[in-house]
Amino acid sequence: MAVPNQGSPIKIHSYKHNGQLHRTWQETTVLKATKTRVIGANDRTRVLESDGRTWVTREPAICFFYTKHWFNVIGMLRDDGVHYYCNLSSPFIYEAGAVKYIDYDLDIKVFPDMTYTLLDEDEYKIHRKQMNYPDVMDRILWNNVSQLIQMIHQRKGPFAYEHVERWYEMFLTYRSF
């Protein structure tokens, strides 16, 4: 699999299980890319929804995408600390200048004190039935919810505050050019 170049801009494409494009982030700067993960950052980037609406992100964000996990993590740097948004998703692929993944509805919102809330279980149940998520997919996704919760409790990977801060400092060096 090809990987994007460090420092280059990419797009992020989120799809639904039925193949429909769900959401596109217009520009994210690649901070690190390997065959198993991409770490990117953006700030005030335009987001296009599938229904044509657009909006702009409000704060700097560090994005972690994986090929070996069924989730991605976005750390948003706000005045009161790092807030995380975790999407249960397919592992990503990199294609045509974009990180692409399938969004499977379930999300975990994590607050700076590391408390968290599981979101969108109702939406997941509806889409699982409508789009025929296979039973094996259901097991994979719930296992990854458990894995994410364990990482949150242990403050591992993206949930280590210093980790996000270090990537944000690198992002600022790219923006100064």
Image: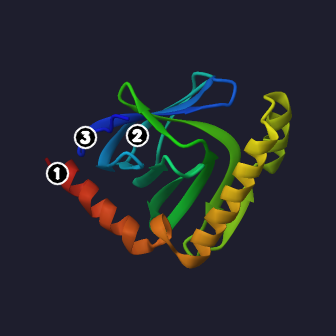
N-terminal label among 3 and 2? 3
- Of labels 3 and 2, the one closer to you: 3
Viewer-closest of 5 and 115 = 5
Instruction: Identify residue type, mark 1.
Output: Ser
- Of labels 1 and 3, the one closer to you: 3
Instruction: Identify residue type, mark 3.
Output: Asn
Tell me the CA gap for discs 3 and 2.
Answer: 19 Å
Report which quarter residue 119 is drawn in.
Answer: bottom right
**At 38% across and 35% down in the image, what residue appears?**
1
For the residue carrying disc 2, how many other residues have a C-alpha within 10 Å: few (<14), some (14-19), or many (20+)?
A: some
Viewer-closest of 86 and 132 = 132
Would you say the residues marked 1 and 3 are in contact, meaning their CB atoms lie under 8 Å apart? Answer: no
Q: Which mark is residue 45?
A: 2
Q: Secondary structure at mark 2?
A: loop
Q: Which mark is residue 5?
A: 3
The image position of residue 147, as x and y in percent, is 64, 64
Q: What residue is shown with label 1?
A: 176
The image position of residue 72, as x and y in percent, is 54, 51
N-terminal label among 2 and 1? 2
